[in-house]
Image: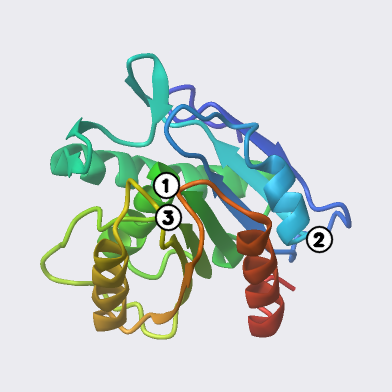
Amino acid sequence: MSIPDNFFIHRFEPSPDHEATSATLLLLHGTGGNEHDLIPLGRELLPSAALLSPRGRVLERGMPRFFRRFAEGVFDIDDIKRQAAALNDFLDAAATAYGFDRQRVIAVGYSNGANIAAALLLLHGAVLAGAILLRPMVPLIPEPLPDLAGTPVLVLAGKRDALVTTAETERLTRLLETTGANVTLHILEQGHHLSQEDISIAREWLQMRDIGS
């Protein structure tokens, strides 16, 4: 089965062990990124995983994003819903096309990519085995909230982040906890960019929960 052209430009790398039961990391870039940006991060976080990295379908001044916004921090909610649904369908199609386990997909999203990963969970429920959200915001508050009981989520924020406040990060954490997700929050002495500390914490989190093996 091929993936329809109207889905996402993407890059897929199978598990180095060629095991169909291995976890797959869904790598979701930030504004202006592409399907290549987070491949090295994925390999560093979980060397045994398959990697699926789509490019956002929305352009903002020529920069790929995963959904539209009207201004900094002001999101187009209708577009979030459309794009999250398309991403969920893309995961189904990709799992069939590439032969990976749809139930063992772990999102790793940075900035805008973290926001669409959070939206995917909030709008479609437990469609991910877990999520690592790097510098996220609250994308939307759906009604009703989904049941994410037991879904592990790691949230990594930067205390010196000029784009995302600590209060916003904590608001997202509370929202996810309300759904029953098992949320771990770390607020680091960092800015909006990722650091080696982020990578170390995320790698250890995956290992401790054994959700990637």
| Quadrant showing the C terminus | bottom right
Residue drawn at (69%, 51%) of the image: 42
The CA span between labels 1 and 3 is: 5 Å
Q: Decide which of 81, 5 is in the foreground and name it.
A: 81
Alpha-carbon distance for marks 2 and 1?
25 Å
Estimate how packed mark 3 is, as few (under 14), some (14 to 19) or many (20 or more) residues with alpha carbons within 10 Å.
many
> Please, what is the three-letter code of the amino acid marked with disc 3?
Arg
Pointer 2: residues within 10 angstroms few (<14), some, or many (20+)?
A: many
Earlier sequence position, callout 2 versus callout 1:
2
Image depth: mark 2 or mark 3 in front: 3
User: Going by the picture, which residue comes out furthest to the top?
Assistant: 62
Mark 1 crowdedness (10 Å alpha carbons): few <14, some 14-19, many ≥20: many
In which quarter of the view is residue 138 placed? bottom left
Amino acid under disc 1: Ser
**Disc number for residue 111:** 1
Decide which of 154, 2 is in the foreground and name it: 154
Residue 28 is situated, as x and y percent measured from the top left of the image, at: 51, 44
Helix, strand, or loop for circle 1?
A: loop
**Picture quarter containing residue 146?**
bottom left
Residue 177 location in percent, x, y? 30, 81
Residue mark closest to the camera, 2 vs 1? 1
| Three-letter amino acid code of the residue under disc 2 | Ser
User: Residue 158 appears at what percent x and percent y?
Assistant: 44, 59
Q: Label 3 belongs to which residue?
A: 135
Q: Position of residue 209 (x, y in %)?
A: 63, 83
In the picture of the structure, the residue carrying the numbered disc 2 is 48
**Image mark for residue 74:** none
Instruction: Of the two numbered discs 1 and 3 on the same chain, state the one appearing first in sequence.
Output: 1
Count all numbered tags in the image, as a single digit.
3
Mark 2 touching mark 3, by CB under 8 A? Answer: no
Label pair 1/3, CB-CB below 8 angstroms: yes
